[in-house]
Amino acid sequence: MAAKKLLLVVNPISGKGIIRDSLLDVVAGFSAQGYAVTVFPTQKQGDATKKMSEAGDYSLVAISGGDGTLNEAVTGMVAYGHHTPIGYLPTGTTNDFAATLQIPKNPLGALGLCLTGNPVAIDIGQFNDRYFTYVAAFGAFTDVPYETPQPRKNILGSFAYLIEGLLKLPNIHPYECTIEYSGGEVVGDFIFGMVSNSDSVAGIRNAFGNHADLSDGLFEVTLIRNPRNLMDFQRILTDFLNHSYDPEYVTIFKADKICIRSEKGMKWTLDGEAGGYYEEARINLLAGRIQMIMGG
């Protein structure tokens, strides 16, 4: 009987290279379950996307890296028209989407889930001509969790994000936006916008009380209006960390199609990575497009 074929895509520098200590054990674990393993280490941005051109030749694709590496693999899976199940070994720094998928943080625990879990069809997003697995965001705060020094996080926990946000206050500027979605329209000056399909974004779970259903055909959309003063800004950040919100400043709704326009280019992040500047972003949900092995 021919062995099942598995493609293991490894980002060797993700999370300071923590996969290196476990790579041989991961390969041995897959092999012990009858997989013929092909290991593909990425060397530069875009490598994982290109490698997905071969995904149809495998019964399982396993991704070892962070959310950015997973984004590349998902992008390639869609671009090349494949539906091969994906197992995720989260070895990045934040691993937001892994938390939503309930995947163990250590590589060997994630390996066990890859071997015992069942693939689930989950929704992803299309952002203009690009794709994202769990979040597209613009404006303030989008880089705060990724730029907050780790020692400060270790000592202060979530309060570190509040401090970092306040430090960036002088550089925060609102965007005058028109947001059209499948249920209506919102107009105003916004300092932040997020279209997500995840329980965890930037290391914070259930921000503003959001809870995602990965297969319900809807995004969770969060918009934050421009605060009047420093006190209001601090209150918004505190609400963010306490999973509550004031509707005067925070608008939350669900939709499967969103178009966000601004007269000046907005800086976007996609799955925690730089997404470029756009005056118009058309975001569509691709229902059940990716097969992911999940926990829970």
Image (tube, rainbow, N blue to C red):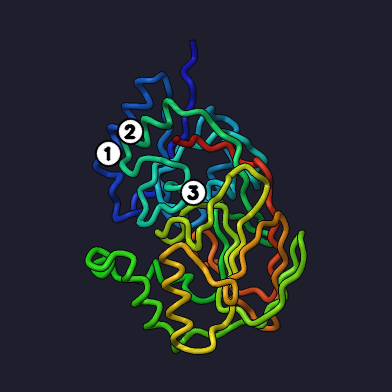
C-alpha gap between disc 3 and disc 1: 19 Å
- Residue at 39 percent of width and 41 percent of height: 89
Dot 3 or dot 2: first in sequence order is 2
Q: For mark 1, what is the residue?
A: 22
Q: Residues within 10 Å of mark 3 (few under 14, many from 20)?
A: many
Q: Quadrant of residue 270?
A: bottom right
Q: Position of residue 200 (x, y in %)?
A: 46, 55
Q: Is residue 22 left or right of residue 40?
A: left
Dot 3 or dot 1: first in sequence order is 1
Q: Nearer the viewer, residue 176 or 106?
A: 176
Q: For mark 3, what is the residue?
A: 70
Q: Position of residue 277 (x, y in %)?
A: 60, 74
Q: Position of residue 43 (x, y in %)?
A: 41, 53
Q: Secondary structure at mark 1?
A: loop
- Residue at 53 percent of width and 38 percent of height: 292
C-alpha gap between disc 3 and disc 2: 18 Å
Q: Is residue 294 left or right of residue 217?
A: left
Q: Secondary structure at mark 2?
A: helix
- Quadrant where the image shows the C terminus: top left
Q: Are marks 2 and 1 in contact (CB under 8 Å)?
A: yes
The number of numbered badges drawn on the structure is 3
**The disc labelled 2 sits on which kind of residue?**
Val
- Decide: is 296 above or below 44: above
**The disc labelled 1 sits on which kind of residue?**
Ser
- Decide: is 29 above or below 268: above
**The disc labelled 3 sits on which kind of residue?**
Leu
Tag of residue 26: 2
C-alpha gap between disc 2 and disc 1: 6 Å
Q: Position of residue 132 (x, y in %)?
A: 58, 55
